[in-house]
Amino acid sequence: MLKKGNKLYSILTGACPKCHQESMYVKKNPYLLSETLKMHERCSHCKTKYKIEPSFFYGSMYVSYGVGIVFAFAAFIISYGVFESSRNTAFISIVLTMIISLPIILRLSRNIWINMFMSYDKKLLESIKN
Ligand SMILES: [Zn+2]
């Protein structure tokens, strides 16, 4: 289902949005907190510059708001809906989910943000091979 060439692939794996050949991030694990947002400057395959303009990724903050709501809502549904916990417990589970999944939310937002401006480019990949 999740194949290279699909936007979702780049969003979920953090792969280069143009060629999907390698990760944009220096460290694959988002929970190495000092390295969570460290990115390569360019893709070593297709030379795409990730930071299109200075402070490009500030825009991903708008995305992270939406992604955060999705995570919070999922936590609420699971604790309140599935486990039938009290409202206070549901609230605590939302807060914990937000804290624990923060590195994932940050990266997902960046991936979604950059994929709004760049798309997979099959021709680019073929031109590199030749
Ligand atoms: Zn690339």
Image (spheres, rainbow, N blue to C red):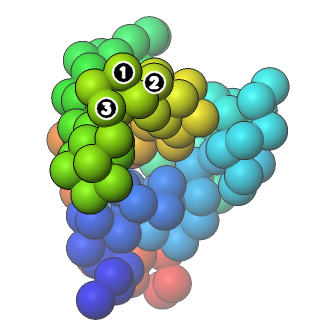
Q: Which residue is mark 3?
A: 86
* Structural crowding at the residue carrying mark 3, measured as other residues with C-alpha within 10 Å and reported as few (<14), some (14–19) or many (≥20): few
Dot 3: element: loop
**Quarter occupied by the N terminus:** bottom left
Q: Residue at x 79, y 38 (%)?
A: 32
Q: Residue 114: name its quadrant.
A: top left
Q: Nearer the viewer, residue 32 or 117?
A: 32
Dot 1: element: helix
Q: Nearer the viewer, residue 24 or 109?
A: 109
Dot 2: element: helix
Disc number placed over residue 128 in the picture, else none:
none
Calculate the distance from the C-alpha at mark 3 to the C-alpha at mark 1.
Answer: 5 Å
Compare marks 3 and 2 and give the one earlier in the sequence.
3
* Structural crowding at the residue carrying mark 2, measured as other residues with C-alpha within 10 Å and reported as few (<14), some (14–19) or many (≥20): some
Amino acid type of the residue that numbered disc 2 sits on in the rendered structure: Ile
Calculate the distance from the C-alpha at mark 1 to the C-alpha at mark 2.
Answer: 6 Å
- Left/right of residue 41 with respect to residue 85 in the rendered view: right
**Measured along the vertical axis of the image, is residue 88 above or below residue 74?**
above
**Measured along the vertical axis of the image, is residue 22 above or below residue 68?**
below
Residue 62, percent from left and from top: 24, 18
Q: Residue 4: name its quadrant.
A: bottom left
* Structural crowding at the residue carrying mark 1, measured as other residues with C-alpha within 10 Å and reported as few (<14), some (14–19) or many (≥20): few
Q: Check mark 1 vs ligand 1: CB closer than 8 Å? yes or no.
A: no
Q: Is residue 97 visible?
A: yes
Q: Please say if the residues under marks 1 and 2 sit with CB atoms less than 8 Å apart.
A: yes
Q: Nearer the viewer, residue 57 or 98?
A: 98
Residue 6, percent from left and from top: 25, 73
Q: Which residue is mark 2?
A: 92
Disc number placed over residue 88 in the picture, else none:
1
